[in-house]
Amino acid sequence: MTSIRKAVLPVAGLGTRVLPATKSVPKEMLPVFDRPAIQYVVNEALEAGIEHFVFVTGRNKGAIEDHFDRAYELEASLHQKNKANILKELEAERPPAGSMSFVRQQAPLGLGHAVWCARDVIGDEPFAILLPDVIVKAAPSCLAQMTAIHEEKGGNIIAVEAVPWDKVDQYGIVAPESRENRTVRMSGMVEKPKRDEAPSNLSITGRYILQPEIFSVLESQDKGAGGEIQLTDAMATLMERQDFFALEYEGTSYDCGSKQGYLRAFLQFALSHEEEGSASLETLRRVLDENNA
Ligand code: G1P
């Protein structure tokens, strides 16, 4: 089975749900404790063996490109101060030179359109998509769990998880048909259905492994939910002629595109940090005390 070498990260969104924090800072660059949100997503992909990252970007997103570049002055200064540990950490989390491409979406026409903008760089091979609003805490990483299933079964794979029924209208929702352990065969999927029209409460988490044929479907995809070109609609079409699996991955997702989801991610990664975890817990307890909570 072909291994998954390339990943698309759509980062053109404006981050309106976390304004004013995102007025001049890309939402993907907001720190989740000690690294920008996007770093967790890139680390997840690196763990899954991704070799090339395609960022679908827009205006005011230059900080993302800078973050993954080398910073010579900073590195020289850290060398001088013998900060070997930080230097090692920076290097481990920076994909090698030439392994990142940046393409512009140009107009906010929807997730399906953003993915389609990566078509030339992806070419004719199966690839991954990671939506950077969502950070997934999992071991092995969510995408690594998916690539393992892909090696075995091929086809297309999306990560799914159960959400409360009153939230199904915020997600892509799948119609499960049969199940083998955590792998679910589907009969369909729908983007942001009303509660009483949703086929289940299994939502699409924002991690995908897709075959390149998705691009020709996206090419002529009509607008769907919210007046946007939806990836979910294109996948539903491709499902008519290709194998599609949903994986109920093991782990927890955090929606950093919303203020409370972002706060939850921040607290989780502060509390589970290898060196800073116990100090973070003390700080959190202090803040709770200060609020008589
Ligand atoms: C997108 C997808 C949706 C998916 C969600 C996960 O929606 O269109 O299918 O469930 O991400 O976060 P968005 O959050 O961009 O509206």
Image: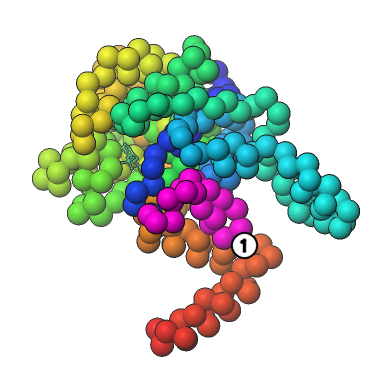
Report the residue at 82% width, 52% height from top: 77
- Colouring scheme applied when the structure was drawn: rainbow
Residue 169 within the segment the image draws in magenta:
no
Q: Quadrant of residue 242?
A: top left
- Please, is residue 209 above or below residue 67 in the view? above
Q: Is residue 62 above or below residue 109?
A: below
Reading the image, the residue beneath label 1 is: 273
115, 125: nearer the viewer? 115
Q: Amino acid at mark 1?
A: His
Horizontal and vertical percent position of residue 94:
68, 39
Q: Is residue 145 above or below residue 213?
A: below
Q: Is residue 95 left or right of residue 205?
A: right
Picture coordinates of residue 228, whole percent (x, y): 25, 30
Q: How many marks?
A: 1
Q: Is 3 situated above or below 177?
A: above
Q: Where residue 14 sits: x, y (%)?
A: 38, 42
| Image quarter in which the C terminus is found | bottom left
Q: In the image, which residues are magenta?
A: 19-36
Identify the residue at image location x=39%, y=39%.
13
Percent position of residue 178, x then y: 28, 33
Instruction: Name the residue at 29% across, 23% down.
Output: 234
* Location of residue 49 (image quadrant): top right
Q: Secondary structure at mark 1?
A: loop
Which of the pair 105/99 is nearer the observer? Answer: 105
